[in-house]
Image: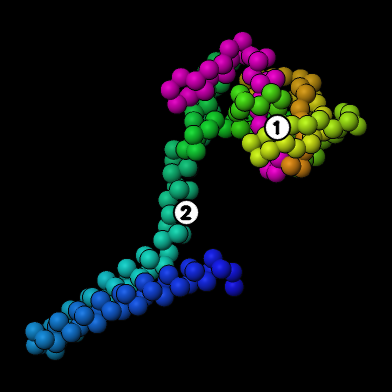
Amino acid sequence: MTLHAAAANGDDALSFLYLLGCLVLVGSALLVRRIPIAQGLKMAGAWVLIFLALFVAFTLKDDFTALGKRVLNERGGEAQVAAGRALRIRKSLDGHFWVTARVNGEDVRFLVDSGATVTSLSAATAARAGIGASSDLPVVVDTANGIVQAQRGRIAKLQVGAIVRQDLPVHVSEAFGTMNVLGMNFLSSLSAWGVEGEWLILKP
């Protein structure tokens, strides 16, 4: 058992003891008031159900929180809408702009990042899209997680909405994890791009 799991179990036990103590106090109050047995049993049953519901809520609070976040993401999360040849991308709940593009015919989810000089692909994404290293010499890339080494590659065809770019240079690295980033070498190829309220507008 991990330290985190032990702590969680300890919190659940304390919550249970607290609720049990409250239930005992309620039961004692009912006995002191000398309520008729039938009525007392009904009231006691109701209180037991209330405390059981509270205990379940305490125990499953992390699951309820995760479910709420998932529902919010599904109802108000990222979206991309074509506006003629332009593309409108709504800000996600995490404060970033995400877009699903086609890389050599494969669907790939990208974080749009104007702070990234070159578009970057995870090693798994590059392998799925059939992108190999175009040079034996690695490059040094400064990322949010520090400086990493990457290989140069090229996307034969990148399609973002109705916007198509061919032979786009990219960086590929295992160090990127599962993250794919649409960088400035793509954004600077557009006729215009910018943020309007909650939307990122990309114009070919």
**Disc 2 crowd, CA 10 A, few/some/many (<14, 14-19, 20+):** few
- With respect to residue 157, does 146 lie above or below? below
Magenta residue span: 176-204
Residue 65: x and y in percent read 43, 54
Which residue is denoted by mark 2 in the rendering? Answer: 66
Q: Residue at x 49, y 69 (%)?
A: 7
User: Alpha-carbon distance for marks 1 and 2?
Assistant: 32 Å
Q: Quadrant of residue 198?
A: top left
Identity of the amino acid at label 1? Asp
Rendered location of residue 19, percent (x, y): 31, 74
Can residue 106 be seen at all in this image of the molecule? no
Identify the residue at horizontal 84%, vertical 32% (top origin): 138
Q: Position of residue 6 (x, y in %)?
A: 52, 71
Whether the magenta-drawn stretch holds residue 182 is answered as yes
Q: Are marks 1 and 2 in contact (CB under 8 Å)?
A: no
Position of residue 143 relative to residue 114, above or below, is: below
Q: Which mark is residue 69?
A: none
Q: Position of residue 1 (x, y in %)?
A: 59, 73
- Residue 68, above or below 81: below
Instruction: Name the secondary structure under disc 1.
Output: strand
Instruction: Give the label on residue 142, or none.
Output: 1
**Dot 2 lies on which element?**
helix
- The reply to whether residue 70 is in sight is yes
- Using the image as rendered, state which of residue 162 and residue 3 is in the foreground: 3
Question: Which of pointers 1 and 2 lies earlier in the amino acid sequence?
Answer: 2
